[in-house]
């Protein structure tokens, strides 16, 4: 046991002390927040640069003076000389379009749009809404219907989702749960391969440099394998914990800045005579998108999600890293790992694909349940289900099975590792791996 601890210490400290580890650990949260900020900025700039002028040839006579300008589109009347208008579109700079409305637009519902460059989907939809608005007004007038009265009848229902638990009721948010579930499935899928590949790559490097021959003269191959797996796993856990702490701190600072130090909901609740639903409605309208997102995230049990994530990441990592270690011991270079990697990736890839459809749409269905119990698929499947609410007994049973799967997988991988780590110059096959597994001693 002391020898395993020494190997764990060596693997852990040798990686944690690297400049690359420190840079990645502290820069990733800043990088992610920067990406989000840049995305929002570029999206806003894209709307600014999407200004366009639309010349309208109204052959029907129904739209004269009835089309309103928007933030993106400016509508101008054009002559009936369509060829000359097309020539103007070709000669003018910037985004210009020619909209030709035929005489029978009321029955055909077809118009033509000419441009040097294809109009974006947003611009086309904006034009369609403008024309539909005018045609609808005409249809209402012909039917003797007051449009103002129709638009004033707009009932809205706010659905407040509640989850019943043994402790009582609590708010739930399907949207927030779905977003978190998808994020966790992506994160676990990537990280299991990232840190598992580090184990495999480290074993291949030591094997090729013949350092491993010196090491196993003092420790058993199984001890070396376990030390490397646990040591690198602890590096991953350390990195995740630091990411969570740093991201939480940065998000708290960003939240305080965006809210300008004002608690909108508290101000509204001070007003007399407002119901809970009215408070939520006013808060949403005043707080904007950020306030809405914050309210939805407040309904999520992040403590359970974070603890479960760390447990399932480490458990899944231990299970898959044992397989990666066996593969690393069986080959002499990374190019030879492909034939063995594919069978390992199938369960994770299968669950990862299903997480965007079946698992999110039916998190408590039979397929989702069994995938969250099978050790090879549970690290992704259960983490997708947890934001939607999973009974404690299912999480406990899944973790027990994951630990059991790790023990069995490690035993199998260890029997292959003890032989493969000393094999050189011979390409391994599945038949060879079976022989190595059956060797006694």
Image: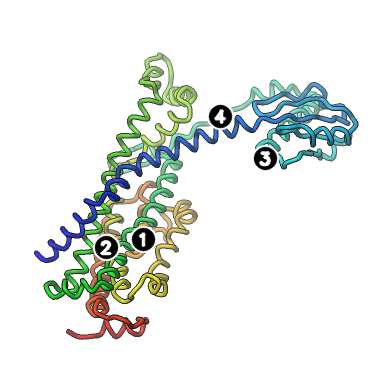
Alpha carbon of mark 2 to alpha carbon of mark 3: how far?
A: 48 Å
How many marks on residues?
4
Between circles 2 and 3, the one closer to the viewer is 3
| For marks 3 and 1 on the same chain, the one whose residue lies earlier in the sequence | 3
Dots 2 and 4: beta carbons under 8 Å?
A: no
Between circles 1 and 2, the one closer to the viewer is 1
| For marks 3 and 4 on the same chain, the one whose residue lies earlier in the sequence | 3
Alpha carbon of mark 3 to alpha carbon of mark 4: how far?
A: 31 Å
| For marks 2 and 4 on the same chain, the one whose residue lies earlier in the sequence | 4
Q: Looking at the picture, does residue 13 appear above or below residue 375?
A: above
The dot on residue 318 is 2
Q: Is 382 left or right of 355, judged from the image as shown?
A: left
Q: Looking at the picture, does residue 127 appear above or below residue 166?
A: above
Q: Quadrant of residue 219?
A: bottom left
The residue beneath circle 4 is 156
Residue 121 x, y percent position in the rendering: 67, 40
The dot on residue 193 is 1
Between circles 3 and 4, the one closer to the viewer is 3
Q: Is residue 271 visible?
A: yes
Q: Looking at the picture, does residue 120 appear above or below residue 196?
A: above
């Amino acid at each position: 046991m002391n020898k395993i601890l020494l190997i764990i210490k060596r693997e852990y400290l040798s990686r944690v002390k690297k400049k690359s580890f420190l840079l990645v650990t502290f820069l990733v949260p800043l990088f992610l927040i920067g990406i989000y900020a840049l995305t929002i900025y570029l999206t806003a700039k894209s709307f600014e640069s999407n200004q366009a002028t639309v010349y309208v040839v109204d052959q029907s006579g129904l739209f004269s003076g009835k089309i309103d300008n928007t933030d993106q589109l400016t509508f101008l009347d054009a002559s009936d000389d369509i060829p000359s208008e097309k020539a103007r579109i070709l000669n003018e700079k910037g985004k210009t379009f020619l909209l030709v409305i035929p005489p029978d637009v009321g029955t055909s519902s077809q118009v033509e749009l000419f441009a040097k460059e294809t109009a974006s989907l947003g611009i086309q939809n904006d034009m369609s809404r403008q024309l539909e608005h005018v045609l609808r007004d005409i249809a209402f007038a012909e039917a003797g219907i007051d449009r103002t009265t129709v638009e004033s009848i707009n009932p809205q229902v706010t659905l407040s989702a509640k989850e019943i638990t043994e402790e009582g009721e609590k708010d739930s948010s399907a949207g927030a749960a779905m977003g978190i579930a998808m994020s966790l499935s992506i994160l676990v899928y990537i990280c299991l391969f990232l840190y598992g590949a580090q184990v495999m790559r480290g074993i291949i490097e030591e094997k090729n440099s013949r350092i491993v021959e010196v090491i196993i003269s003092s420790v058993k191959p199984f001890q070396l394998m376990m030390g490397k797996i646990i040591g690198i796993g602890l590096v991953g856990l350390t990195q995740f914990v630091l990411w969570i702490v740093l991201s939480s701190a940065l998000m708290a600072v960003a939240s305080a800045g965006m809210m300008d130090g004002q608690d909108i909901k508290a101000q509204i609740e001070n007003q007399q005579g407002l119901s809970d639903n009215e408070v939520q409605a006013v808060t949403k309208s005043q707080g904007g998108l950020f306030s809405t997102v914050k309210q939805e995230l407040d309904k999520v049990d992040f403590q359970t999600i974070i603890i479960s994530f760390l447990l399932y990441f480490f458990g899944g990592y231990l299970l898959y890293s044992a397989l990666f270690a066996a593969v690393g011991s069986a080959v002499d270079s990374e190019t030879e790992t492909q034939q063995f990697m594919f069978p390992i990736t199938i369960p994770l890839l299968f669950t990862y694909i299903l997480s965007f459809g079946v698992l999110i749409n039916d998190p408590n269905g039979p397929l989702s349940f069994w995938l969250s119990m099978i050790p090879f698929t549970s690290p992704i499947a259960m983490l997708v289900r947890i934001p939607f609410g999973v009974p404690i007994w299912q999480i406990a049973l899944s973790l027990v099975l994951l630990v059991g799967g790790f023990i069995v997988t490690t035993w199998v991988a260890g029997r292959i590792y003890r032989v493969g780590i000393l094999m050189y110059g011979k390409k391994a096959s599945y038949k060879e791996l079976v022989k190595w597994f059956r060797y006694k001693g």
